[in-house]
Image (cartoon, rainbow, N blue to C red):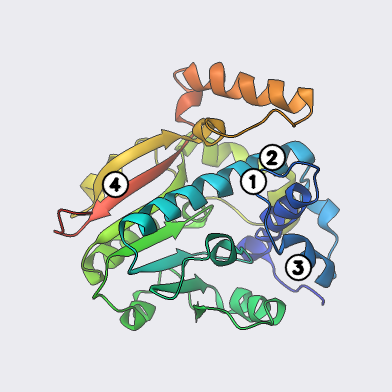
Amino acid sequence: MKVSLTGAAETLLAPLYARALDACSPHPLLADPVADDLLAKLDYDFSRLGMKQSSAVGVALRARYFDQRVREFLAAHPQATVLHLGCGLDSRLQRIAPGANVRWFDVDQPDVIALREQLYSSPSDAETVAASVTDPAWLVRIPTDRPVLVVAEGLTMYLAADEGPRMLRSLVNRLARGEMVFDTYARFAVRSTRSMALFRQTGARLAWGVDDPRELEREVPGLRLVKADSAYATAADADLRHLPLVLRLRLAFDTEVLSRLPLLRRVGHISRYAFGEDERI
């Protein structure tokens, strides 16, 4: 299947390739159940994205971290709605297997959803929404009678600086109660990515940076920061014993050294926010 995605949409192929590399490793960290099968269906030169095994480990750890946050929310709210924003070709629904009491919406650009629906040929428990996440019109389709979890992995930094807060305000204003979990890059980190192979090859650009997760409490009325973890925290509780020594040493250096430096520990965060008046959230 020929891939015709360009720009920011094309970058979704990098984490897909990374999850496939992890799945095919002797001791996968994420063990994505479909990534390798999806990869085999696509006519695309993945080598141009500059994704190596070390990068794949980082992607797998980040996805694993997000999966854990979703499972925690659904354990507390077995009857909930999940909005998976910028879903790309991710198989989070299949990894989580939330059950019939959870409504799940995969949201992404129309060209991405069209490709996704071709690749995921079997029936899915998710409803797909082909729309820009920054267009509030699609939110009228989302029921508001249950707690809602909004999850967005690797999305916010592709939004314009005015689009990100506006999208969050639309979500808070429309949805009655729930939580959001998403990652952000600091402003200096957004600027520093321009020379990376992924962005040179695809023409995509990162735009929105957030230096302090509490900024969003001021910009988005009703949003309350629950917890913000450094981007380095994704490896904290992972079993890394089976990784090659070089990768283990690199992750240990990132976690124990870089994460303690005043500037670098702010390179990125994965933050959890609550909204709405339900005290149980």
Whole-number angstrom distance, CA of label 3 to CA of label 4: 36 Å
Badge nearest the viewer, 2 or 4: 2
Could you tell whether 92 is left or right of 241 in the image? left
Whole-number angstrom distance, CA of label 2 to CA of label 4: 29 Å
Whole-number angstrom distance, CA of label 1 to CA of label 2: 5 Å
Mark 2 lies on residue: 57
Whole-number angstrom distance, CA of label 4 to CA of label 1: 27 Å
Secondary element under disc 3, as helix, strand or loop, is helix
**In the rendered structure, which disc, 2 or 4, sits on the residue that comes first in sequence?**
2
**In the rendered structure, which disc, 3 or 1, sits on the residue that comes first in sequence?**
3
Q: Dot 4: few (<14), some (14–19), or many (≥20) neighbours within 10 Å? A: some
Badge nearest the viewer, 3 or 4: 3
Q: Position of residue 3 (x, y in %)?
A: 77, 72
Q: Residue at x 61, y 61 (%)?
A: 8
Mark 4 lies on residue: 216
Q: Residues at badges 1 and 2 in contact (C-beta under 8 Å)?
A: yes
Badge nearest the viewer, 4 or 1: 1
Q: Dot 1: few (<14), some (14–19), or many (≥20) neighbours within 10 Å? A: many
Q: Residue at x 82, y 57 (%)?
A: 46
